[in-house]
Amino acid sequence: MEVEELLSFKIDKPNTGNTLKRKKYEINDENSAPRSKKKGGIVGQIQAIGAEVTDDDKAKIARMVEEQTEGDLLDETSLKKLLLQFEKKCYKNQEMRIKFPDLPEKFMESEVELNDVIQEMHVIGTIPEFYQVLIDLNTVQSLLQLLAHENTDIAIAVVDLLQELTDVDTLNENEDGGTALIDALLEGQIVAVLVQNIERLDETVKEEADGVHNTLAIIENITEFRPDVCHEAAQQGLLQWLLKRIKAKMPFDDNKVYASEILAILLQNTDENRLLLGDIDGIDVLLSQLSAYKRHDPTTKEEIEYMENLFNSLCSCLMVPNNRNKFLKGEGLQLMNLMLREKRMSRNSGLKVLNHAMTGSEGADNCQKFIDILGLRTIFPLYMKTPKPNKEGHTKDEIEEHVVSVIASLLKNCQGTQRQRLLNKFTENDHEKVERLLELHLKYLDRVRSCDNEIEQEKLRYKKQGLPIDSDLDDEFYLKRLDAGLFTLQLVDYIMLEVCSSGEPSIKQRVMQILNMRGGSVKAIRYIMREYAGNIGDAKDDNTQEAEQDRILKLVDQF
């Protein structure tokens, strides 16, 4: 190819179909093309096909690109003309459809013209500073009305446009314009309108499947820019549609993965959504979908992501006490216990779900039931030997944290024969589980002490620089210690106090024997547990919190 031809090369306008790839895929997949092609340009394309580019050629190309960009950008007047043209096309199409409802050939031309002007409006996505003009001229309301257009091609074209306008990078370029646009869309009940539209789309048609994908992208964009919208979005029928899409008996595809991702986002930090999901039998839907992975591993990277999204959604739901009972009645414990036995990819995530289901006083019924279904036979092999982490997901430290957390919850919540069966485990096979307990204690104690030394060095630097160490910094240091393994250490030491207090005398004797042999310290254990008691803050009311603190301090004194 001649240099002259290369210099005259023009980039084709991007296809407005399903070009979206979610951020998670972009990060994980090095070969995937990024959603927004802002870098590279003509020079990169020329170099990609092997032609040499001199400095003079680069300068000419840069001038051409600059001139082309200046020509493409709209000023406010041009934008208003474009929007006026859009409104005229909308009105004309509406008029023709009313006049000739049964004669498509009469209104088809106006529909094509309407579609063309919607495509032209994609350029607005490059000028977020003019988004206010869209609102002032009521263009946003017109676009929302078109989502209910009889011709789904028009509705899909509008979805493509809104997906581009709400791109988070674009919204952040001009926060005022982005906020104004999102406020206008929310005022027009955009989520409800989008849900009504996707319910009529046929995903066996590629264009309509792309429309569903871009609809989910709009919702992701809005919730990322304004996380507080999650509750409002779920109330407008989105949660019901997501569950329906997840359980639909269709071939596995990107839209199913994306639906699971949006579901996880909606449940992540919103108790109202978690309660709503429980009320519409969402726990049963999640358990039903996850049951496919009790004996079979997901086969692709996308399916692994789908499975993890469902597990994360289930964990989020279990943070609301009302859903614990639904999980119990839906035989969630039996399913998770089976996953732990089968040693499949779902095992580690199943362990995390058990941790969420049993923690706190609200998990008492699940703890009792877990022992009744012989869960101790499943959890203690994982306690004795931490399973290898999957390539995707949980680390070895996270797995150990979940295991000791489950055992600690069982000790807190179980009574009667179930508690005795649990305590008896620590005397089996010449107290091997006590030895493992001390092994974990010493492992995490070394890590925490190493972290404490780093924090002390950091505090010295602050003092030398004359900087104050306030409560916020102390909290930051405490979180750093938790990340280093303090929380797991606290759980391990709590288990140690419980079994020494309530179990056979031989358990405490073995603990003291190993501490003396390994140079351990009872004083260190007491200090850790007093600190743990002082930092308990998850209780729902002060009375419960004080009772838990008193119980731990009583165990410390007995030890």
Image: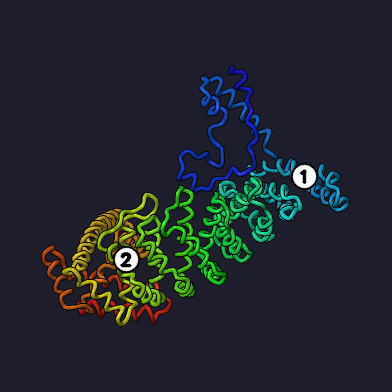
- List x then y, in percent, for residue 469: 33, 61
Q: Quadrant of the C terminus?
A: bottom left
Residue 196 in percent (x, y) is at 68, 59
Q: Quadrant of residue 463?
A: bottom left
Report if the CB atoms under discs 2 and 1 are less than 8 Å apart.
Answer: no
Taking 427 as reference, is 213 above or below it? above
Q: Amino acid at mark 1?
A: Leu
Q: Is residue 82 above or below residue 43?
A: below
Residue sitting at x 36%, y 77% = 368
Residue 546 placement, left or right of 327: left
Farthest front residue in view: 295
Query: Could you tell me which residue is drawn at 23 percent across and 79 percent down?
Result: 502
Q: Nearer the viewer, mark 2 or mark 1?
A: 2
Q: Earlier in the sequence, mark 2 or mark 1?
A: 1
Residue on which disc 1 sits:
114
Name the residue furthest right. 99
Q: Which residue is mark 2?
A: 378
Callout 2 environment at 10 Å: few (<14), some (14 to 19), or many (20+)? Answer: some
Q: Nearer the viewer, residue 500 or 453?
A: 500
